[in-house]
Every structure is written in structure tokens, then in C-alpha cells.
Image: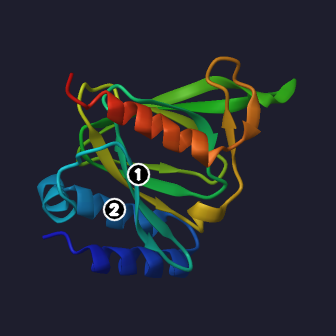
Amino acid sequence: MFDLDAFNAACEAAAAETGDHTAVREIVARAVADPAAVLARLGAPQRAGMGVLYQGRGVTVINFVWGPNMSFMPHNHHMWAVIGLYTGREDNIFWRRLPDDPTRLEAAGARSVGAGEVCALGAEVVHSVLNPLPRLSAAIHVYGGDFLHQARSEWDPETLSERAFDPDKARLMFEASNRSLEPG
């Protein structure tokens, strides 16, 4: 059984002890190794969005649910992150800044993460996310800091130009994805 309170406490303690994502990655890996247990505790995803599961001194734990075929623009976190999928798939494209124009990006790699798998991101990683499936995908994201109040950047998906992250725009992207779930 997945015990959310114990999970949050373990992530908080591990981050405080090591100051990085190494031990947290192992905690997340153990949790999502049994995706059915996480689903039983959090429930089957019904709508795209983000739900804060825990906000502590050293970590923020968020349940991200990506809508069918949803694409989320390149962005950074300015803190490490550990992503553990418990249903569906999350395709990440990793980006690097252009040497001659550091406000713009170019693709630098990719990683597909499925249910039961984990992906760790360093503090300065820029990535975009795609749910390639025609159904909801969900993951527990553990961030090494106060994710909810961290200033960060996003990049226009067409021009790959940097701008301040807009949480209202992100919310609208989830809402638009949810409209695709509505019948008729």
C-alpha cells in the first residue's frame, strides 16, 4: 500500500539529509514500482491538472495529470525534480540554450517515461512534456524546494524564445485539455 504521508516525510528527510535528488529518486522509484498501489491511494485520474500533495520546507510534491495528447511548452524549475509515472506515459524533450543567443533553445535529447519508471532532472534542466497517449497520464513530481513560489521561465513552443513562466497560461492549457475529455 502506498502511504502518502510516509512518502512525503521520507522525501523531506532525504532531501534535508543529502541536499540533492539522489535519495529522493530511490524513494520515488520504490513508490511507483507498484503503480496499482499509487492509483489505489490517489485514485484514477479524471481530469488534467496539478494537485499539490505536499508542501514542506525542502520539497514540494505534486500530482501532475496530463490530458490526452497534451503538450506542455519548454520550461525550467530552477531546482531539481524527480518524476515518477504511475499511469500512462510522459515524453520529455530536453533543451539547451543556444550559445549565440542564450534566451533561445535547441533540442538536446529526449526520454520517454512509462508507468513504474522514474526520471530525475537537474536544477537547470529545461524540458517540455508530451503525453503521447489518447488517455490521461499521471505522475508524482517531487521538487527540491518551494516549486509553487519559484520564479522560472517558459519558452514559446513555436519560436523557442524565453519569457517569464505564466501560471495562468499553464492553467488554461490544462483546462483546454479537459475540454477534450467532455462528451460531444
Quarter of the image with the N terminus is bottom left
Give left or right: position of 127 versus 66: right
The kind of residue on which mark 2 rests is: Val
Q: Residue at x 56, y 37 (%)?
A: 127
Residue 97 placement: quadrant: top right
Residue 14 placement: quadrant: bottom left
Q: Which residue is at the front of the view, 180 or 131?
A: 180
Mark 2–mark 1 contact, CB under 8 Å? yes
Q: Which residue is at the front of the view, 4 or 67?
A: 67
User: Most extreme residue toward the top, as rendered?
Assistant: 158
Examine the rendered structure and indicate whether residue 176 appears above or below residue 3.
above
Does residue 126 appear anywhere in the picture?
Answer: no
Q: Residue at x 34, y 36 (%)?
A: 178
Where is mark 1, residue-wise? Answer: 83
Examine the rendered structure and indicate whether residue 145 appears above or below residue 160.
below
Examine the rendered structure and indicate whether residue 180 appears above or below residue 28.
above
Examine the rendered structure and indicate whether residue 181 appears above or below residue 30.
above
Local SS, label 1? strand
Q: Position of residue 85 (x, y in %)?
A: 30, 48
Q: Position of residue 173 (x, y in %)?
A: 48, 35
Quarter of the image with the C terminus is top left
User: Most extreme residue toward the front, as rendered?
Assistant: 184
- Counting residues from the N terminus, which is met first, the one under dot 2 or under dot 1? 2
Where is mark 2, residue-wise? Answer: 28
Give left or right: position of 122 versus 163: left
Q: Residue at x 41, y 51 (%)?
A: 83
The kind of residue on which mark 1 rests is: Ile
Residues at marks 2 and 1, CA–CA distance in whole angstroms: 8 Å
Does residue 66 appear anywhere in the picture?
Answer: yes
Q: Position of residue 68 (x, y in %)?
A: 30, 29
Q: Position of residue 26 (x, y in %)?
A: 35, 64
Say few, some or many: other residues with alpha carbon within 10 Å of mark 2 (under 14 / 14 to 19 / 20 or more).
Answer: many
